[in-house]
C-alpha cells in the first residue's frame, strides 16, 4: 500500500500557506476504458478513511448525473454507509432522487452549473475528502465538467496498455480546464502491480 500512502501524503494531505487542505475533492479518470479507475478510487478512499480518520466520500460520477433534488443540501441524505464508520459512498445506482410532493421543481445536474456547484459545496461541507470515480475521457465528459469546481483531477494510466498519443490527448483535455495528477501502474494488472506516481501536479 506504499503507493496509496504516498498519494495520501503528497496529494490529499498537502496544505496551503494558511495550513488548509489543498486537495479535498479530486476526480479520477483515465484516457481509455479498463484502466482500473474504480479500483484505485475505492482503495484510496478506504486508505484515507483508515489512515486519517476523517470523513471520506467515494462518489460515482454516474450517481451525480442522476441527482434530481429541489435543494442541493438534500444530496447528502442519499450517501450510503460502508463497513467503515467514516467512509460513505454515493453510488451509480442512486437513481432519480426527488423531494416530497408539491415541492419546488427539481434541478438538473447537467443543465444547471449553479446547481452543480451547490451540490459539491454541500458535499464539501459534510466531508473532509471526496473522491470521484469518473468514466474514461474517451467516452464521457464528466471529469472535464467537474474540473473547474473541484481541487484536482487524476488520470489513471496502466503502463504498457495505453498509447502515448492517448495519454497526451487525455492530458490536454483535462489541462484545458485544470491541472492534473498523473498516476500509472507498472504492469497490466492493478490487482497485482505496484503502482507508481509518474507525475503529480497539485492545485496552485
Image: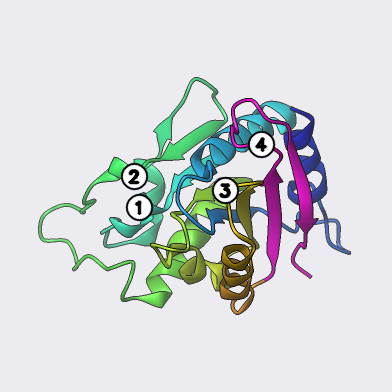
Relative depth, front residue between 51 and 133 = 133
Q: Position of residue 54 (x, y in %)?
A: 66, 36
Q: Position of residue 201 (x, y in %)?
A: 77, 63
Dot 1, how many residues are within 10 Å of its Cα: few (below 14), some (14-19), or many (20+)?
Answer: some
> Alpha carbon of mark 3 to alpha carbon of mark 2: how far?
15 Å
Residue shown at 58%/54% (left/top)? 162
Question: Which residue in the protein does label 2 denote?
Answer: 92
The answer to the question of whether label 3 and label 1 lie on touching residues, with beta carbons closer than 8 A, is no
Task: Indicate the quadrant containing the C terminus: top left, top right, bottom left or bottom right.
Answer: bottom right
- Residue 187's tag is 4
Question: Which residue in the protein does label 3 denote?
Answer: 130
Upstream in sequence: badge 2 or badge 1: 1
> Alpha carbon of mark 3 to alpha carbon of mark 1: how far?
15 Å
Upstream in sequence: badge 3 or badge 2: 2
State yes or no: residue 199 in magenta: yes
Relative depth, front residue between 178 and 89 = 178
Q: Nearer the viewer, mark 3 or mark 4?
A: 4
Q: Position of residue 4 (x, y in %)?
A: 72, 36
> Alpha carbon of mark 3 to alpha carbon of mark 4: how far?
27 Å
User: Could you tell whether 202 is left or right of 191 in the image?
Assistant: right
- Residues rendered magenta in the picture: 179-204
Question: Which residue in the protein does label 1 denote?
Answer: 62
Amino acid at each position: 500500500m506504499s503507493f496509496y500512502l504516498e498519494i495520501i501524503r503528497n496529494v490529499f494531505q498537502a496544505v496551503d500557506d494558511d495550513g488548509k487542505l489543498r486537495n479535498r475533492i479530486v476526480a479520477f479518470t483515465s484516457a481509455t476504458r479498463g484502466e482500473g479507475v474504480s479500483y484505485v478510487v475505492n482503495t484510496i478512499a478506504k486508505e484515507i478513511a483508515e489512515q486519517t480518520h476523517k470523513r471520506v466520500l467515494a462518489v460515482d460520477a454516474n450517481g451525480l448525473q442522476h441527482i434530481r433534488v429541489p435543494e442541493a443540501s438534500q444530496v447528502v441524505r442519499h450517501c450510503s454507509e460502508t463497513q467503515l464508520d467514516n467512509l460513505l459512498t454515493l453510488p451509480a445506482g442512486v437513481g432519480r432522487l426527488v423531494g416530497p410532493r408539491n415541492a419546488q421543481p427539481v434541478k438538473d445536474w447537467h443543465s444547471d452549473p449553479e446547481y452543480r456547484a451547490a451540490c459539491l459545496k454541500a458535499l464539501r461541507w459534510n466531508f473532509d475528502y471526496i473522491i470521484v470515480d469518473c468514466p474514461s475521457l474517451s467516452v464521457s465528459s464528466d471529469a472535464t465538467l467537474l474540473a473547474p469546481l473541484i481541487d484536482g483531477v487524476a488520470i489513471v494510466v496502466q503502463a504498457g496498455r495505453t498509447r502515448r498519443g492517448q495519454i497526451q490527448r487525455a492530458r490536454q483535455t483535462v489541462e484545458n480546464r485544470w491541472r492534473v495528477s498523473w498516476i500509472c501502474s507498472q504492469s497490466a494488472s492493478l490487482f497485482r502491480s505496484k503502482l507508481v506516481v509518474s507525475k503529480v501536479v497539485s492545485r496552485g
